[in-house]
Amino acid sequence: MALSGLFLVFFLGQHATINLSSVISPETFNSWSHFMGYNPVVQYILQPILIAGVIVHFVMGIVLELQNRKARNVRYAQYKGGANAPWVSRNMILTGLVVLAFLGLHFYDFWVPEMAYKYIEANPEDPTRYHHELVEKFLSPARVGIYVVSFVLLALHLWHGFASSFQSMGVNNKYSPAIRNFTRLYAIVVPLIFIFIALYHHFNHTH
Amino acid sequence: MKLLLKIWRQKNNDSKGKLVEYPISGIEGDMSFLEMLDVLNQELIEKGEEPVVFDHDCREGICGSCSLQINGEPHGPDRLITTCQLHMRKFNDGDTIVIEPFRATAFPVIKDLMIDRSAFDRIQQAGGYISVNTSGNTVDANAIPVEKDKADASFNAATCIGCGACVAACKNASAMLFTSAKVSQFALLPQGQVEAAERVQNMVRQMDLEGFGNCTNTGACEVECPKGISLENIARMNREYLTASARG
Ligand code: HEM
Ligand code: SF4
Ligand code: FES
């Protein structure tokens, strides 16, 4: 859980960096995207590892949740969860499942067309198409709304999860308060970058 | 003080239980929570009804048997105390108090509020000891020097009274805080090193076999623990477990 989660956190940072370039310079975004899309190491090694990482993480998350429910076969009539633990820590499965649903949409939006373009339709390489493809996606207010809500939930997931993964790996020492601060800053800033990008393209698009 | 008690009554492990309401009056703020239940039981006995079964022994916070879930929290709303140390002045006249047993699949109800916590004993037996020859040539433990901070941390872990509040509070009914305290008290001492790797592996295996849930680091256990056992112990156990597994 911790290792797959941390791996995803790392990926998220890299993803945010590339996407941010779409706001700053369409040319940079196009060249980075083209590199990611056609570099064999990225395509045939890193991409499968990433997909496996996502699957391992959410399958383990769901198995964990089922085992944990089984560990209390009779529910409490009254249970004051909020008295001793924060909401985010008690609702990882909820925030996680929303992120999973979002990933479904996200794959449908970008990954499926990309795979179809490259491997099914076998179109020629076009290093300039990425930026306008991206911008077009963010025309729809519904899609932008879903993206924004999903990233807020991702922030909640990471608010607990990123710091939690250190405890799971046995790291709890004098650096832990600093680690917690850093992970919480990351949990807010990275999703905010994605939200900013979606809103930027939505409102800056000249029709 | 007048109160309305809603108490879990359950004949035995096979039967289904339910909350039963008992209005009670004449409760003093200086009474302990268990004394309040004594008053109720006396009334029930005088009326010819069956008294409420609940676990208790020392009534001074050291045996860990008074396991009650009070208004949704183990050992009630106060911190760093057991149910026997909870005073009725923490409640107000007219309050409704819901009293349930600690709930975990691994802690089956024996009767009413009394649960079977022998799962903890079996976790202890799986590795919560050191092998010392005690037949006449025992070496004084103080003969081996131990760093002060390690000795203190070990002692703090050893103050766990096995009450089960950590399991009761945890949304996953995980026994990680208890098990990690029992692992830590030896892991920090030279005497504990010989069996360190098997200890953590065996105790964790037994914990899983008993059907406790997994730790997701919500921290509820640490907040509700009457002895203030810290989450650092869980991190230490994770470390011990990872290194023991890596070494094979
Ligand atoms: C890209 C998105 C995601 C990232 C970056 C991420 C990150 C993390 C991290 C760092 C942890 C902490 C691991 C630990 O405590 O040991 C975690 C835990 C968890 N994640 Fe995710 N996660 C993501 C998506 C998902 C999805 C799609 C699910 C779907 C079910 C999910 C469910 C869970 C669950 C159930 C936990 C464990 C509960 C807990 O530790 O409290 N996550 N995640
Ligand atoms: S760790 Fe604390 S709450 Fe858990 S059994 Fe020990 S004393 Fe009770
Ligand atoms: S009765 Fe012993 S700790 Fe409460």
Image (cartoon, coloured by chain):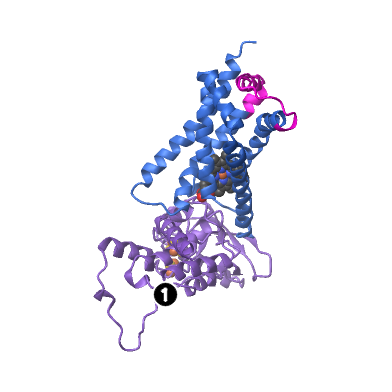
Residue at disc 1, CB closer than 8 Å to ligand 2 = no
Foreground: B46 or B233?
A: B233
* Amino acid residing under circle 1: Tyr
Q: Colour of chain B?
A: purple
Tell me: residue B123, above or below residue A104: below
Foreground: A78 or B2?
A: A78
Describe residue A133's horizontal placement relative to residue B53 as left or right: right
Is the C terminus of chain A in the top left, top right, bottom left or bottom right quadrant?
Answer: top right
Q: In this view, which residue lies farthest toward the right?
A: A121
**Can the viewer see residue B83?**
no
**Can the viewer see residue B196?**
yes
- Horizontal and vertical percent position of residue A150: 60, 33
Q: Quadrant of residue A110?
A: top right
Residue on which disc 1 sits: B129
Q: Quadrant of ligand 3?
A: bottom left
Disc 1 crowd rating (10 Å Cα; few below 14, some 14-19, many 20+) is: some
Count the marks: 1
Q: Which chain is blue?
A: A
- Horizontal and vertical percent position of residue B106: 58, 66
- Image: magenta residue range: A119-146
Tell me: residue B242, above or below residue A36: below
- Horizontal and vertical percent position of residue A32: 54, 27
Foreground: B61 or B239?
A: B239
Q: Secondary structure at mark 1?
A: loop
**Chain letter of disc 1 in the image:** B
- Horizontal and vertical percent position of residue A99: 61, 38
Q: In this view, which residue lies farthest toward the top?
A: A207
